[in-house]
Image (cartoon, helix red, strand yellow):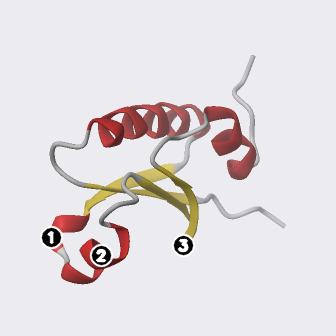
């Protein structure tokens, strides 16, 4: 049985320096592992803004919150279940 490829979402907002750092890390890791990722600006949705206002960036993997504020690359790789090719 083939394992489904995970999807990663990073919830962000404009002017957030932690968001910039998190997006760069997530984008690089996802590109290496062939995992889909996208970003969502929480300020475009009142419900997301209320939920995540002080937590951004928030990294979500397959609908489950994974990290807030900073992304630990090794923890992200472990959650995605794969290591980079060496």
Marker count (numbered) = 3
What is the crowding at mark 1: few (fewer than 14 residues within 10 Å), some, or many (at least 20)?
few
Q: Residue at x 84, y 67 (%)?
A: 1
Q: Nearer the viewer, mark 3 or mark 1?
A: 1
Q: Is residue 61 above or below residue 77?
A: below
Q: Is residue 80 above or below residue 46?
A: above
- Mark 3–mark 2 distance (CA, rounded to whole Å): 13 Å
Q: Are marks 2 and 1 in contact (CB under 8 Å)?
A: yes
Q: Is residue 65 above or below residue 22?
A: below
* Secondary-structure class at tag 2: helix
Q: Is residue 74 left or right of residue 36?
A: right
Between residues 37 and 74, which one lies in front from this camera angle?
74
* Secondary-structure class at tag 3: loop
Mark 3, residue position: 63
Mark 2, residue position: 48
Between residues 2 and 81, which one lies in front from this camera angle?
81
Instruction: Give the mark nearest the N terminus, 3 or 2.
Output: 2
- Mark 2–mark 1 distance (CA, rounded to whole Å): 8 Å
* Residue 29 percent coordinates (x, y): 55, 34
What is the crowding at mark 3: few (fewer than 14 residues within 10 Å), some, or many (at least 20)?
few
* Residue 72 percent coordinates (x, y): 60, 37
On residue 81, the disc is none
Q: Is residue 78 above or below residue 38?
A: above
Q: Residue at x 32, y 55 (%)?
A: 39
Q: Nearer the viewer, mark 3 or mark 2?
A: 2
What is the crowding at mark 2: few (fewer than 14 residues within 10 Å), some, or many (at least 20)?
some
Q: Are marks 3 and 1 in contact (CB under 8 Å)?
A: no
* Residue 17 percent coordinates (x, y): 27, 35
Q: Residue at x 16, y 49 (%)?
A: 14
Mark 1, residue position: 44
* Residue 8 percent coordinates (x, y): 50, 56
């Amino acid at each position: 049985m083939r394992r489904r490829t995970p999807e990663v979402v990073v919830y962000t907002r404009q002017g957030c320096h932690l968001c910039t750092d998190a997006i760069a890390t997530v984008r690089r890791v996802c590109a290496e592992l062939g995992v889909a990722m996208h970003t969502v600006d929480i300020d475009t949705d009142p419900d997301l803004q209320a939920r995540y206002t002080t937590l951004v960036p928030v990294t979500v993997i397959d609908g489950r919150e994974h990290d807030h504020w900073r992304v630990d690359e090794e923890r992200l790789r472990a959650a995605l279940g794969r290591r980079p090719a060496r």
